[in-house]
Image (tube, helix red, strand yellow):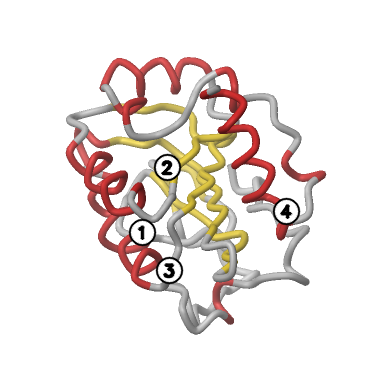
Amino acid sequence: MHEIEPYYGWRDDYIASEDKRSPFYRRQYNEFEYTQKIYNYYIHPQWDFFGSSTLYCKVLFADYETNSAVIEFIGEWNDALHNDIMELKRTLIDPMIKSGINKFILLGENVLNFHGSDDSYYEEWYDDVKDEGGWIIAVNFREHVTHEMQQTGIHHFLHLGKNYNDILWRKLKPANMAEFFESLLVRSIG
């Protein structure tokens, strides 16, 4: 797992640790020392800790003109034992919403498992963004992870599933991500 880096192809466009509105503003990274772990496995030092011991993230892009953010994840999303959604919502999502972000693209290729609890924080997140035309889309999550999310009822608040998998998002320009997913969302609903 230590070789899996967050996507770095957009660093010329955005770096969360240099964004004054980012919860990770001024975060320092040590490229030579691996200290963060998911269970007994070290992970790359570029991943950001937000309060969960099993799930880490990287804000790849935030655009305050389109009110959108792209967030990549790695690890095990565990709401049952660690209440990861509460940590994510309070530490990262709430500050982003206060900064004007209401469209969230969650990249889940490196999320290996999901253990659900209830959907309260997902509902709160959805309620926080829906009136401003916002949305939350889970992209490229593994099929078994998506299935578990649906069994927990999260699909009522996040857009996820086959319409949002197998997306070659790395080929897109970061400034076009919100527009691309908005059009995909309209086609999927319509």
- Mark identifier at residue 176: 4
- Assess disc 4: are there few (<14), some (14-19) or many (≥20) residues with their C-alpha within 10 Å of its C-alpha: few
**Label 2, label 3: how far apart the Cα atoms are:** 37 Å
Near mark 3 (Cα within 10 A), the count class, few <14, some 14-19 or many ≥20, is some
Amino acid found under the numbered disc labelled 3:
Gly
| Count of numbered circles on the image | 4
Q: Earlier in the sequence, mark 3 or mark 4?
A: 3
43, above or below 112, in the image: below
Front-most of 31 and 74?
A: 74
Residue in front for this viewpoint, 3 or 17 = 17
- SS state under label 4: helix
For the residues bearing labels 1 and 4, Cβ distance under 8 angstroms: no
Tell me the number on the disc at residue 100. 3
Question: How far across and down, in percent of the image, does residue 16 sit?
Answer: 56, 72
User: What is the C-alpha distance between the residues marked 3 and 4?
Assistant: 18 Å
Amino acid carrying label 4: it is Asn
Q: Position of residue 170 (x, y in %)?
A: 76, 45
Earlier residue among tags 2 and 3 = 2
Q: Earlier in the sequence, mark 4 or mark 2?
A: 2
- The numbered dot on residue 40 is 2
**x 78%, y 54%: residue:** 173
Q: Quadrant of the N terminus?
A: top right
User: Mark 1 sits on what residue?
Assistant: 93
Q: Which image quarter holds the C terminus?
A: top right
Residue 126, position in %: x, y?
Answer: 31, 44
In the structure shown, which secondary structural element does the residue marked by tag 3 occupy? loop
Q: Nearer the viewer, mark 1 or mark 2?
A: 1
Q: Amino acid at mark 1?
A: Ile
Residue type highlighted by circle 2: Asn
Q: Is residue 98 left or right of residue 144?
A: left
